[in-house]
Amino acid sequence: MNINDIIGQGGVVEFLRTAHKQNRIASLYIFHGPPSVGKTTTAISFAAGVNCADNPGIGCGKCKICKKFLEINHPDLIIISPVDSSDPKQIEQHQSDMIEQQRWRINESPQSMIRIIQIRDLQEKLKFHRWSASRRFVVVVDAEKMRVETANAFLKTLEEPPVDTTIILVTSQLNSLLPTIISRAQLVKFNKLKPEQISEILHQKYSISLTQAEQAAKLGNGQLQKSLKFAIDEDLINFRLEIIESYLKKSTADFVKICPVRINQREQMMILLEFMNILNQDCMYIKLGLADKIVNYDFKQRLVDYVKKVDITKLIENNDILEQAYQSLNLFIDPVLIRDHLIGEIYEC
């Protein structure tokens, strides 16, 4: 893989290639945009390309340098990502797991954050000369998960990074970063991926059937990792089917039955709301004569029959109810209360 293989971010790729060609690589970038659109993958591919002797600025994907960078196992590529604890042993294990699994997010939880001890450790490493690469790279994943004191501790390094070192902060919440950090960085905006771009990745890279890939891409709403989960996670696949069945039958009993297993987990409740929102949008598309736009096309005829019995004003009202449920979940209101509200407003009306 090299930077030219990044899908859906042509403008970003061209910008970074030009920066290398003109010898104008910045010391600090912020890669920002929607979640799961390739920001961290691009950062690592960029680092590999800059250091590749066989295909400078792009990368060959085959030489020792490229392989080490792409496997996040080169000493001149430092990855920092949120951890659950400030315990040095746990952080060290986290780093080992990243290299072993070639993933930069390991067992994340709501408590995961970038710890000040990680920044202190980075600052110690940066005191030494780089190992063998022509340019050292530091990639901070989910940079918005730095507390103010951690960001302030990092600020001096960001203001005056070592020579031939580039720091890339990766975030899906640009406004959560300190203004003093944003003002010192070169901002690189990533776009939301189109469904056809995601389905291409799922089909080519993960060997998922084209039909399944296309539907998962629409369900993922422009996020690759979410789309991948919808394509291969059997629990999620079955969960979607259960939600659709309970929705079409307006079965409170079925809805309650599938919720208790997942209701205590905020992330799962968010997925439930996403499925319901997509279902409601599908119904609105059908009502407006735009059935070709629906996501749940494997249930098309049943949705068409269902919509005949529902007024569009109710579908619009459902949309508002689901939006309120999203907001309540983000305010950490008890998911059980949200579920009961949905039952009263959508299933029993």
Image (cartoon, rainbow, N blue to C red):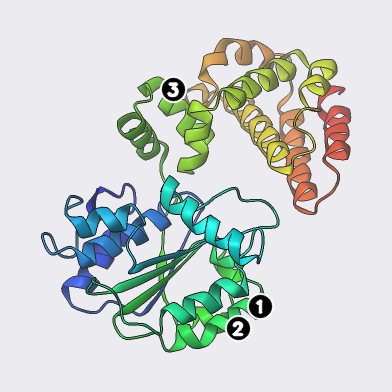
Percent coordinates x, y for residue 133 in the rendering = 24, 71
Amino acid carrying mark 1 in the image: Val
Residue designated by label 2 = 152
Using the rendered view, name the quadrant where residue 78 is placed: bottom left
Q: Is residue 64 above or below residue 17?
A: above
Q: Earlier in the sequence, mark 2 or mark 3?
A: 2
Q: Residue furthest left?
A: 54
Tell me what residue is drawn at x 74 percent, y 43 percent. Answer: 266
Residue designated by label 3 = 212
- CA neighbours of label 3 inside 10 A, class few (<14), some (14 to 19), many (20+): some
Helix, strand or loop at label 1? It is helix
| Residue 148: image tag | 1
Percent coordinates x, y for residue 131 in the rendering = 28, 73
Mark 2 and mark 1 residues within 8 Å of each other at the beta carbon: yes
Nearest to the observer: residue 143 or residue 195: 143
Tell me what residue is drawn at x 50 percent, y 54 percent. Answer: 34
